[in-house]
Amino acid sequence: MKISIIYILVGILLFSCNNPNNSADHSTFTLESTNDSIYIQIGKKESNQIILNQYFCENDSNYLAILNPNNHSIYIYNLDKQNLYKKIKIENEGSNAFPETFGYVIKNFDTIILISHMPPRVSIMNSEGKLLKSISIEKDENGKKIFMAVPWYAQKGILSGNILYIIQELAV
């Protein structure tokens, strides 16, 4: 199955890799229409739901990560080469296990942040699938229970620098 990744092209245009040698002003953007498309062969069980996908840039290359909740894996596609770069298996049993993943954020290949709704947990994993650190997010620092928004009602975590923001359910 081939999918057209027009949204990724727009994302690449808007949020392309930073080049430290480029002194251009990055506070303004110019949009240009194009008929170019990127086609990537993905597995039959992967999904193009936006909540399961993430674009990121590493080592001057553009990548698309797709979470496959059916087999508890993240597939990373190299957009420049238009191929599968890496499959990362998220263990669901044993000492390196992580509960059902409802969201993730990739900062770089050595910092993949996994978010679980049940139980409420955040972990950092590397690109080899090894959990580096894991914390419970059931309660905030004041001991108040946290009610995370489920992914189909809200966005996944938002990473700003080294701070991860997780959207909570509306409390009334």
Image: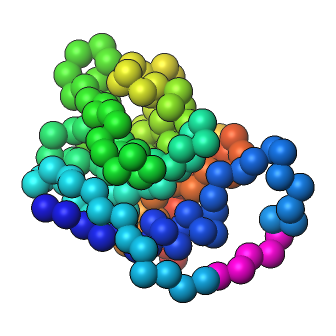
Frontmost residue, 78 versus 145:
78
- Compared with 6, 91 (above or below) is above
Tell me, yes or no, if residue 136 can be seen here: no
Q: Nearer the viewer, residue 12 or 95?
A: 12
Q: What residue lies at 60% left-to-right and 36% top-to-bottom? A: 59
- Write the residue at 61% across / 83% down: 32
Residue 138 spot, x, y in % from top left? 46, 42
The image quadrant that residue 152 belongs to is bottom left
Residue 64: image location, x then y, percent = 41, 51
- Does residue 128 lie above or below 77 as drawn? above
Q: Position of residue 68 (x, y in %)?
A: 23, 48
Residue 70, visible in the rendered structure: yes
Check residue 73 for magenta coloring. no
Name the foreground residue: 148 vs 154: 154
> In the current view of this chain or complex, which residue is farthest to the left?
44
Residue at the image point whose x is 53% and y is 27% from the top: 110
Instruction: Provide residue 34's location: percent of width, then percent of height.
Output: 49, 81
When the figure is inspected, residue 156 is found, relative to residue 162, above or below; the finding is below
Q: Which residues are magenta?
A: 27-31
- On the rendered image, what quadrant is the N terminus found in? bottom left
